[in-house]
Amino acid sequence: MTPAPRRIAILASLATVLALVLAHSGPAAAQPEPGEALYQSACSACHRSGTMGAPRLGDVAAWGPLIRQGQVKLTAQGWVGIRRMPPRGNADDATLEQFARAVVHLARAGSAKWADPTPEELSRIEREVARLQAAAAKK
Ligand code: HEC
């Protein structure tokens, strides 16, 4: 038999390891793809059923021509708003990065091989947003 103080020490370190594992696996485990949470809370209002003519999640034919515009351009257009797509998809509290990830979620369901944007891609999206806003201000 292991002496009692050692058993307590072993149990204590097991509890620490368990606490660490739980702390690190919390939200990430419940949320496999980062963009999906925002998609569910904001974008799905239109993009699930096609409200107002929104391209539906998983509609490969509808997303094909959009995906071909490229991740930077498409994300920036959605953020600024284009035709019947409202700016930020009405997700007014979302950051550009969260919005970009929701676009990735939609695009991937539409067969794009996109990944969540890198910091470098995010700054290209920011520059494209600034360019679109400047062009809109001139009109
Ligand atoms: C109120 C309805 C509505 C909501 C909410 C909405 N969308 Fe849209 N979205 C649209 C419509 C409608 C279009 C099609 C625009 C058109 O071509 O007229 C569209 C188009 C888009 C496009 C294609 C833009 C382009 O360049 O043609 C992207 C990307 C997009 N939405 C992303 C999102 C994301 C991401 C969210 C959530 C953060 C979101 N949308 C929420 C209605 C919505």
Image: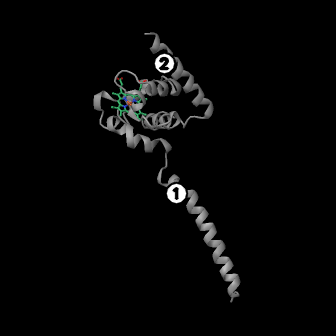
Mark 1 lies on residue: 26
Q: Position of residue 109 (x, y in %)?
A: 43, 38
Q: Amino acid at mark 2?
A: Gln
Residue occupying the point 48% across, 18% down: 133
Q: Residue at position x 30%, y 27% from top?
A: 53
Image quarter for ligand 1 equals top left
Is the CB of mark 2 within 8 Å of ligand 1? Answer: no
Residue 23, above or below 137: below
Above or below, 3 against 47 in this view is below
The local secondary structure at tag 1 comes to helix
Report the Cα–Cα distance between label 2 and label 1: 38 Å
Whole-percent x, y for residue 119 in the image: 61, 34
Q: Which residue is mark 2?
A: 133
The amino acid type of the residue labelled 1 equals Gly
Q: What element does badge 2 sit on?
A: helix
Q: Residue at x 41, y 40 (%)?
A: 39
Q: Nearer the viewer, residue 65 or 93?
A: 93
Do the residues bearing badges 2 and 1 touch, measured as CB atoms within 8 Å?
no
